Amino acid sequence: MIVIADGGSTKTNWCLINEAGRKILFNTEGYNPYFSSEEYIVESLNNSLPDHLEKEKLTEVHYYGAGCSTDAKRKIVYDAMKRVFTNAEVKIGHDLLASCRALLGDEPGFAAILGTGTNSCLYDGTDISLNIDSLGYFLGDEGSGCYIGKRILSDYMKGYMPKGLRESFYDNFALTNEDIFDNIYNKPLPNRFCAGFSKFLYDFKDSYEDYTYSTIEYAFTAFFENLVIHYPNYKDYKLNCVGSVGYSFRDILSVVADKYEMGIGKIIRSPIDDLVNYHLHTSKK
């Protein structure tokens, strides 16, 4: 039995392929080794994996995760997975490679992640050939849910948010400025905290179209200005994108991409289905 997983900073999508070839999907929280220790990952998996999953019978685990970009960070996740899936061959890859394989298969092109965080690259059909580091939520991640969430929180705290939307924000979250500072500076996973507010904006986008459009356009313009346009000959590629933010606001993303003379390719919320198909196709070669 084989398990394939795509792990973001917020959520991990898993697919079990059993002996009969049946696909069984399930979710756990996300495990970014920059924020989650080996012990935390082991404990979380043991508490959240489905009861029907016979871990000792698994033969392969293909895990693609946010933050798994260096040997040291991959080792944290690898060691955790080996403790949970004791009899399986475990392979750890970066979530950006998962996105490439889901979006482009074995064709070269440009791929991006616009979810809790941001990432982007050129893909040669097999591996990532060029990646400009988005620098994470503190220094970059332009266009991400965290980037948008920080803008929303700033507008809320400074009183720049439209009055009715600000009232709805407080009704939904009951957060004071002190609460927000505490979550950002003192509590774990501040990137996940900030990113959650992009969904709030999506839920109210029809009632506050101008504010939503300007906020999202600002974020996607920053994504292009700080990342996309710095790839060689970027206009020769289509923008292929995976992630809840890119998918939810794909209409605005298309407008911004058009301003930079870049066509739109495939935009999907989650790579797991296409990633599974990639592995099934590859295994048959």
Image (tube, rainbow, N blue to C red):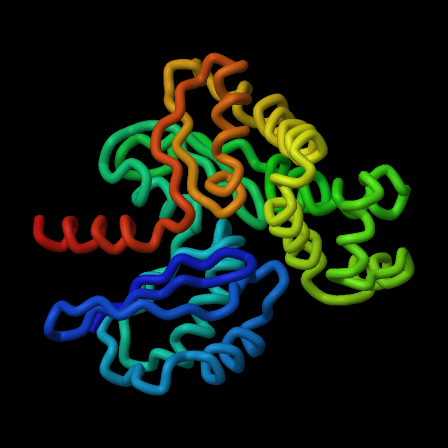
Quarter where residue 24 is shown: bottom left
How many marks do you count on the picture? 0
**Residue plotted at (49% across, 30% down):** 251
**From the viewer's perspective, is residue 194 above or below residue 175?**
above
Task: Tell me: 41 left or right of 201.
Answer: left
Q: Residue 283: horizontal and vertical position, in percent?
A: 14, 55
**From the viewer's perspective, is residue 89 above or below residue 6?**
below
Task: Tell me: 186 left or right of 134.
Answer: right
Q: Residue 92: horizontal and vertical position, in percent?
A: 38, 59
**From the viewer's perspective, is residue 30 above or below residue 108?**
below
Q: For this rendering, which residue is in front, 10 or 165? A: 165
Q: Quadrant of the N terminus?
A: bottom left
Q: For this rendering, which residue is in front, 171 or 94? A: 171
**Residue plotted at (53% across, 53% down):** 67
**Residue plotted at (87% across, 47% down):** 157
Q: Residue 142: horizontal and vertical position, in percent?
A: 63, 35
Q: For this rendering, which residue is in front, 32 or 82? A: 32
Q: Residue 163: horizontal and vertical position, in percent?
A: 84, 43
**Residue plotted at (29% across, 53% down):** 273
